[in-house]
Every structure is written in C-alpha cells, then in structure tokens.
Amino acid sequence: MIAAARFVICGIFLAPAALPLQAVALLQSPVAAQQRDFTIDPDYSCVTCHTEKRRAFLLGTHSERGIRCHDCHGGDPRAFEQATAHTGPEYVGPLDKMATVQLCSSCHSDPDQMRQYGLPVGELAEYRTSRHGQLLLEQRDYNAPTCTDCHDAHTILPPNDARSNVYPTNIAHTCARCHEDAAMMGEYGLGTDQIETHRASAHGVALYQRQDFAAPTCVSCHGSHAALPPAVTQIADVCGHCHVLVRRAFYAGPHGRAAQSRDLPGCTACHSNHGTERIQPNRIAATCTECHEADSPAALAGLEIQEDATRTTVELHAAEEAIQALARAGRTVADVKLRYQTAVTAYNQISQAQHSLDLEVLEDLSRQVSSISRDVRAAEEVAAEHRWEHGLALIPIWFLALSATVLAWFKLRALRRERR
C-alpha cells in the first residue's frame, strides 16, 4: 500500500486511509489526468448502477481531465458485483465533509498539479481561517459547508461557466442555501435577509439587472474560501478594492481616522452593508444628523455639502437639457458636449471628495460644474435668440408671399367671371 503523508488541518491529523490509492497516484503524477481517455467505457462498472451520477459527472471539468469515480471513492471499477466493487482497493464510498476537504486538497493544494491549469493552491489554508472552516475542522460542526456544498460533488464547473454554482449571478443563491435557512441560522444568531437585501441594493441592481460583473457578490466582501465578515477597521479597505478614490478621500478626512480607531464602522456607517445605496444629494444632511446633533459644526458642514451637491446636480441637468435643445435645433454640439463631459468629471469627483469633508476642494469642484453649465446654457440661449431673430426676419417674406397668394386668387376669380 502506498504510504501517504498525513494532512494537518487546523492542527487535526487526518489519517491517510481516507485518501484513495488512485488519488495519491494522481498527486504523484501531475500529467496522469491528461493521459486518460475522456470517455467512460462500457466496462466501467460504476456507471452501471450510478447512472444518475454519470451524466452529472461528465458535464463537469474533472471528467475532461480524466478523473474517474474510483479516483475519489476507491473500489474496483471493473467488478460488476456490488460486494466486489465496493471492497476493492482503498474503497471509501461516500465521503463525509471532513474527508471531502482532505480529498479535494490532495490535488488542489499541490502546486505541481494546479500550475498547469493556472489555479491557486491556497484554498485549504484560506478555508482554515474562515468561519466555515473553524466550525467544521475545529468544532466538527457539520452545518458548516465543505467544498462540495458550494462547488457540487460531481458537476464541478469553472467559475466563468454560467451553469456553475459560483458564477457571479449564482453565488447569492449558493450562499442562500444555508443563509436563508432560518432554523440553521438561528443556532448562530444570524439573520436571513442578507441575500434579499443585497439584491435590492445598488450593488445588486448593477449585478442582476445590468449584468455588471464589476459589482460585488457575497464573496467580493466576505471572501470565498476564507469567508469572514470584515472587521470594523477593514471595511473601508474592502470597499476600497473597487472604490479606490473614495477610500483615499475617506482616509484623508475625520471619518477615516474615526474608522481606524474603531469609533466608526467605515463605509457602512452611512451606506449600510448588504443594502448599500448611494446617498442622494438631498439626503446628505439627514444622513449626517443620524450621528451628529443638528446644530453641531459637523451637521452644518453636511448641510453646506448638501446645498452644493443639490445645486450642481440641478445645473448639470440644465446643461444636459440645453445640449438636447441645441441638437434639436440642428446646431453643432460636438464642442459643448466635450465641455459638458468635463463638468460630469468634476461632478463625479465631488461625490468622491465628499468623503474627505474638505469644503475647499468641494467648492472648487462645484465652481467648475457651475461655470461650464452656465457656458452651455448661454450657448443655447444665444442660439434661441438667433432662431427668434431669424423668425422675425422671415415675417416680411411670409407677408409678401401671403399677399401674392391672395392677389392671385382674386385675379383667378375675375378671369373665371369674364369667361362666363
């Protein structure tokens, strides 16, 4: 029998007997999976009884690499009697959650095997640090998910396959199998509305309605194999993976210092966690007064920021409407569109700079938006005046044309009377 090194998981030694002989052989020979036939021949007895598993397995990526039933479950795949097939070399049968972690890591923690596919090898180490791994590996809590609870046991697909359980739009459903189970979550004092709340949030709308895969899923904030909620001092950094400029402004202001000292839960203090939404300009002051007294310097600064943000929002919309009016009038709008885009850039910078609470920076950006907006609207007003003047100039021409028409009509009537 091939001796296999013991695997240490969270300080727990797992006996090598749980690791099938064929899986050890694959571990020792990185190219073995590539040399196998990708089809299951009629003499392969496992699929004679387990027909429902055959189709599921052949859909997965493991079957493409030549991995077969006995590589994970052991037994004799050439024996057509159950007693013989299930008592073959290293037969382990169905794997429990602990054995599943060991088996999957026997390949997925091996750099020699994973290098050829460009896959990471740190999943097991990450899983040990996660809340899921701590529950399963340290406390033997079998409510905690193992590898196959998220990736499936047989139809294992890559994350970029839309059929995969870990495809971006499927991740929430995968997490919801446990996290929407009220009985299970009640044991740990956890709520069950996180998935529903996330779907209704700005992030959820971007992901599920606009198919914007830059929007975060559950694992974007909590991690996948190292699933843990961010600590208070980590929240701004987690959000900053995407919102880089916002994070920079946040740490430059008083809120960033409060977050680092654990006095403020980072971004979630204003934006919440699963129900993340953008604070509208007319709600900035109200958001500030959730923590600060209404007449405090901080609340008054929030009111000033709200007034600037509301004014620039109105001015930007007015500039957009002016451009549309110019286009309807047949005027060239290429130049004013470029000016408008500059204003949009400054406006977006306002939403980022607001997190620093630097009123001077915000005032400067607001002036840029206001100045460009006034220029665009002035261009539309000048064009409107030209249209009015042009219309006035045409009045005499229309009068002469109408007079000529009336005279011609009278002349025609006179000719008809003469003929009669």
Image (spheres, rainbow, N blue to C red):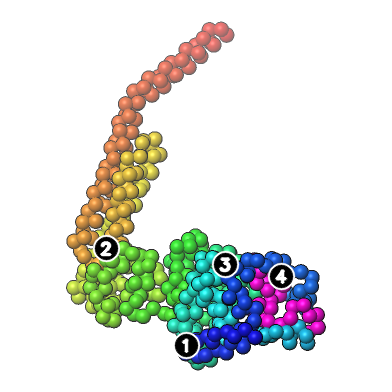
| Image: 383 above or below 315 | above
Amino acid type, mark 3 = Pro
Mark 4 or mark 1, which is nearer to you? 1
Say whether residue 63 is magenta.
yes
Q: What range is drawn magenta here?
A: 53-82
Query: How far apart, in angstroms, are the residues tagged by discs 4 and 1?
Result: 35 Å
Marker disc for residue 158: 3
- 230 relative to 168, above or below: below
Q: Position of residue 263 (x, y in %)?
A: 27, 81
- Indicate left or right for 231 with 33 as reference: left
Q: Are marks 1 and 2 in contact (CB under 8 Å)?
A: no
Real-space CA distance between mark 2 and mark 4, rounded to the nearest whole angstrom: 55 Å
Q: Earlier in the sequence, mark 4 or mark 3?
A: 4
Residue, disc 4 = 55
Q: Please report the residue visible at 30 percent of the width from the left and 31 percent of the height from the top.
A: 389
Type of the residue with mark 4? Arg
Q: Residues within 10 Å of mark 3 (few under 14, many from 20)?
A: some
Residue at (42% x, 73% y) in the render: 221
* First of labels 4, 1 by sequence position: 1
Mark 4, other Cα within 10 Å: few <14 / some 14–19 / many ≥20: few
Which corner quadrant of the image does residue 261 belong to? bottom left
Q: CA distance from mark 4 to mark 3?
A: 17 Å
Question: Which residue matches tag 1?
Answer: 10
Q: Earlier in the sequence, mark 1 or mark 2?
A: 1
- Lower position in the chain sequence, tag 2 or tag 4: 4
**Residue extending farthest bottom:** 139
